[in-house]
Amino acid sequence: MGPQGSGKGTAAQELSNILKIPTISTGDLFRTEAASGSELGNRLKSIIDSGSLVPDELTVGILKQRLLQDDCKNGYMLDGFPRTMEQARLLENISQIDKVLYLDVDFDTVIERIGGRRTCPKCGHIHNVKFAGDPNYCSVCGTKYVVRADDTEEAIRKRLDTFTQKTLPIVEHFRQKGLVLSVDASRTPEYTLKQILKGLGK
């Protein structure tokens, strides 16, 4: 867990490779199920297409099915879940939580990171203007970069407000149970990963 721009996705991918356990994203589960053509998939698709949020009980039901698969026998990581206190409580009913990794980074750093992000509309390459390279044209295919609508400072601050209101109470809930490993994510991804592995005793 952590605010947008804290490096959750990068850390999860690296940890998944090192620990040999899958990283599970409920968003990916939704997309896979919705594309399957199943009765549940069609129900999900109609919810997603309408712009509504998938109910917590349905989300946890789909997640529970995924956790029963063979590749989860030795453990798994959840990325982007739980997002609400109700989801956290439901999760505790279906899974034993060993550790909650919290990637701690101040909001000014987040705004700088995400605000400097540029996306290539042609090949999808993502570049950050605070690092080396041409800030205007894609280093992969030469197309002019664009700033995504949700990467503007106003949009980022709105998302951080939501994070403060919705996610931080969940982190505190797990912290009171002694499950939270808080890691400094303000430096490089490599540094963050080293701190996580150290905290996990790996």
Image (cartoon, grey):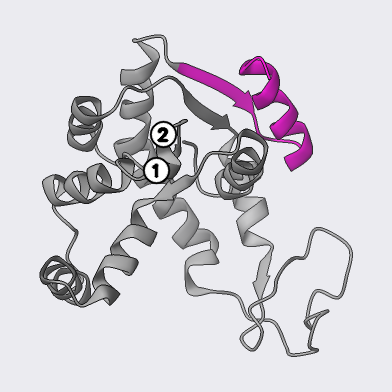
The image shows residue 15 at horizontal and vertical percentages of: 62, 38
Give the residue at x 57% y 43%: 12
Q: Picture quarter containing residue 108?
A: top right
Q: Is residue 81 left or right of residue 198?
A: left
The image shows residue 165 at horizontal and vertical percentages of: 31, 37
* Local SS, label 2: loop
Total marks drawn? 2
Q: Is residue 44 left or right of residue 100?
A: left
Residue behind mark 2: 73
Towards the viewer: 149 or 170: 170
State the separation of the CA atoms marked 2 and 1: 6 Å
- Placement of 25 over or under 141, stated as above or below: above
Q: Is residue 188 visible?
A: no
Magenta extent = 180-202
Q: Is residue 58 visible?
A: yes
Give the residue at x 10% y 71%: 39
Give the residue at x 14% y 51%: 58
Q: Picture quarter containing residue 145?
A: bottom right
Give the residue at x 45% y 31%: 75
